[in-house]
């Protein structure tokens, strides 16, 4: 009887551990830091197999120099690899391809 209870207890612990894995794997929140001297006026991202850029994540806002914003990149596809496109107030555009948002919590523009 004790052995059966111990086995079921161990199975329950293992199953509860496995149930928590998808939640942590699905965390696609990344803080974008603007450490440049210029405001970011538009910010786009798309998973690596997308044919076009998604909408401007900042919308009508801008990301001022020295500020940061926390963004949820979960687009429902399950992708971890994204491309970023930031347009700055001075007209510069920076594109960074292949950002693994499942492995980072912060991304910096310096």
Image (cartoon, grey):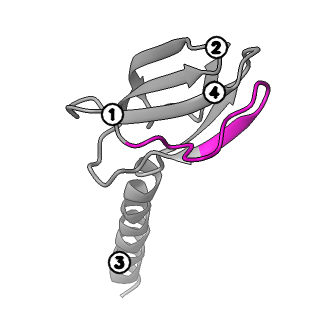
Q: Position of residue 86 (x, y in %)?
A: 52, 24
Sooner in the amino-acid sequence: mark 3 or mark 1: 3
Sooner in the amino-acid sequence: mark 1 or mark 2: 1
Eyeballing the image, is 54 above or below 8?
Answer: above
Eyeballing the image, is 77 above or below 49?
Answer: below
Q: Are marks 1 and 4 in contact (CB under 8 Å)?
A: no
> In the rendered structure, which segment of residues is drawn in magenta?
55-70
Q: Residue furthest bottom?
A: 1
Q: Which mark is residue 40?
A: 4
The residue under label 2 is 90
Q: Classify 10 Å Cα crowding around label 3: few (below 14), some (14-19), many (20 and above).
A: few
The residue under label 1 is 53
Nearer to us: label 2 or label 3: 2
Q: Classify 10 Å Cα crowding around label 4: few (below 14), some (14-19), many (20 and above).
A: many
Disc 1 to disc 2, C-alpha distance: 21 Å
Disc 3 to disc 1, C-alpha distance: 49 Å
Residue 15 shown left or right of residue 105 in the figure: left
Eyeballing the image, is 72 above or below 82?
Answer: below
Look at the image and tell me in which quarter the C terminus lies.
top right
Eyeballing the image, is 61 above or below 21?
Answer: above
Identified at 45% across, 45% down, the residue is 73
Sooner in the amino-acid sequence: mark 1 or mark 4: 4
Nearer to us: label 4 or label 3: 4
Q: Which mark is residue 8?
A: 3
């Amino acid at each position: 009887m004790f052995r059966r209870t111990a086995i079921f207890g161990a199975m329950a612990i293992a199953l509860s551990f496995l149930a928590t894995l998808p939640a942590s794997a699905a965390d696609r929140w990344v803080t974008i830091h603007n450490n440049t001297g210029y405001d970011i006026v538009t910010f786009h991202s798309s998973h690596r197999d997308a044919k076009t850029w998604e909408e401007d994540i900042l919308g009508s806002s801008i990301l001022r120099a020295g500020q940061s914003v926390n963004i949820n990149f979960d687009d429902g596809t399950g992708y971890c690899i994204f491309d970023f496109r930031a347009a700055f107030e001075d007209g510069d555009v920076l594109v960074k391809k292949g950002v693994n948002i499942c492995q980072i919590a912060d991304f910096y523009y310096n």
